[in-house]
Image (cartoon, helix red, strand yellow):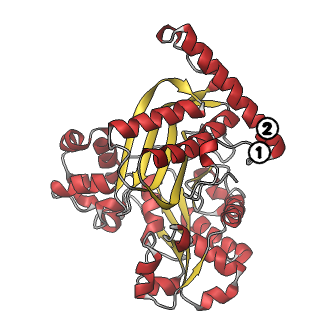
Amino acid sequence: MDRTILHCDLNGFYASVECLLNPALRAVPMVVAGDPEHRHGIILAKNELAKSYGVVTAETIWQARRKCPELVVTPPQHKMYSRYSKLVNSIYERYTDLVEPFGIDESWLDVTRVQKLFGDGPAIADTLRAIVKSELGLTISVGVSFNKIFAKLGSDYQKPDATTVVSRANYREILYPLPASALLYVGKAAEQELASLGIRTIGQLAACDKSLLVRKLGKLGALIHDYANGLDDSPVQPAQAGRQMKSVGNGMTFKRDLAGREDVLTALTALCDEVAERLRRYGLKCQNLSVSIKTPEFKQISRQIMLEKPTNLARVLREAALALLENTIGTNTPIRTLTVTGGQLVEAQAAVEQTSLFDEAKQAELARLERLETAIDGIRVRHGAKALQPGVLLNNDLGIEKE
């Protein structure tokens, strides 16, 4: 028997919350965006009036204002968005314990076992839409299907405040004309590779020879071919199932572009300090390190390496990240945004110590660093994050500050 999966997507979430907090915003074209004075002027969300002017998410404020000069810009309030996200998910959990958040504004629900109580999938979807609107003043779009991938495509199909059923009988008609980029995990690079093969729609992707996709895209090719053909049996994880964290990262857009090794080192010091502190707080170590930059022209460049051994030490992460940049793109490339992410996480206590690869002096140095950084954690817990900061961060002009 097929499962019944819902994908619930909050419509214009950030903008909708802002309109709840300030109802006057409903009458004007408005967007939620960062502060352009601090180089964070990217549109994060927009209301329907702004959308009618052609304003789109991820463009800059100045681009949006060329389309709509009277645009109202509101700064983001992430704590409020998190609060409303939890409230929405608590509504979902009244109907099923199988609720899997996918970001702050989306969730999958498996309602297969509760249909005798609450009705079939479309009925539950309509009920959830009505309750979220009446209790919280927000709207959701819901996709109903037999797997997670098609349910997500369904929630994107009609917006705002709509239910779309994607069944075995109609999925080719509904989904196959959609662009291949609408499918989960088909990013820009994969989209370009598919276009080089003449594949531009999900239907063309489904009909393509799977072995060709594997040759071109590796495992991703096989995965998206299965997805396009409705082959996805991944479960919806229980809401309370302490799912394993997959990565810990930190990124920042700076007041001015990073220019040269000294700037890069300052930025990496701050970012790696935060990543390492969070890893220690969670009792984890990372085995993989990735560094991603965005240039002033918004070109994205990412690099990653495997570390010699799992770590949660800021100095080790910083040295590895700096070497990675120096050995690949160099440190003279102007950088607008820099992100450091630790991946392939393992429990700190269970991390395999590859002692044969390290001499006693290096082991002693790593142990000293661990004691030092753990002591710093304790001081910051007692006296605040600003109590101890790396010297290179003092009086910097990049906008870096411990909160």
Residue 21 position by quadrant: bottom right
Mark 1: amino acid: Ala
User: Which percent across, then down, holds residue 93?
Assistant: 70, 56
Q: Is residue 143 visible?
A: yes
Task: Indicate whether 379 appears above or below 61.
Answer: above
Q: Are marks 1 and 2 in contact (CB under 8 Å)?
A: yes
Residue at image position (64%, 68%) is 128
- The quadrant of the image that shows the C terminus is bottom right
Residue situated in front as seen by the camera: 113 or 307: 307
Q: Is residue 1 visible?
A: no
Residue situated in front as seen by the camera: 354 or 345: 354
Residue at image position (52%, 9%) is 359
Task: Indicate whether 19 appears above or below 399.
Answer: below
Residue at image position (70%, 59%) is 86
* Label 2 Cα crowd, 10 Å radius (few <14 / some 14-19 / many 20+): some
Residue designated by label 2: 379
Mark 2: amino acid: Ile
Task: Indicate whether 321 appears above or below 393.
Answer: above
User: Which percent across, then down, holds residue 341?
Assistant: 51, 42
Q: Which mark is residue 153?
A: none
Residue 261 position by quadrant: top left
Q: Earlier in the sequence, mark 1 or mark 2?
A: 2
Residue designated by label 1: 387
- Locate residue 181 relative to residue 107 in the image: left or right: left
* Label 1 Cα crowd, 10 Å radius (few <14 / some 14-19 / many 20+): few
Q: What's the CA distance linking mark 1 and mark 2? A: 7 Å
Residue at image position (69%, 77%) is 137
Secondary structure of residue under mark 1: loop
Secondary structure of residue under mark 2: helix
- Locate residue 401 relative to residue 46 in the image: left or right: right
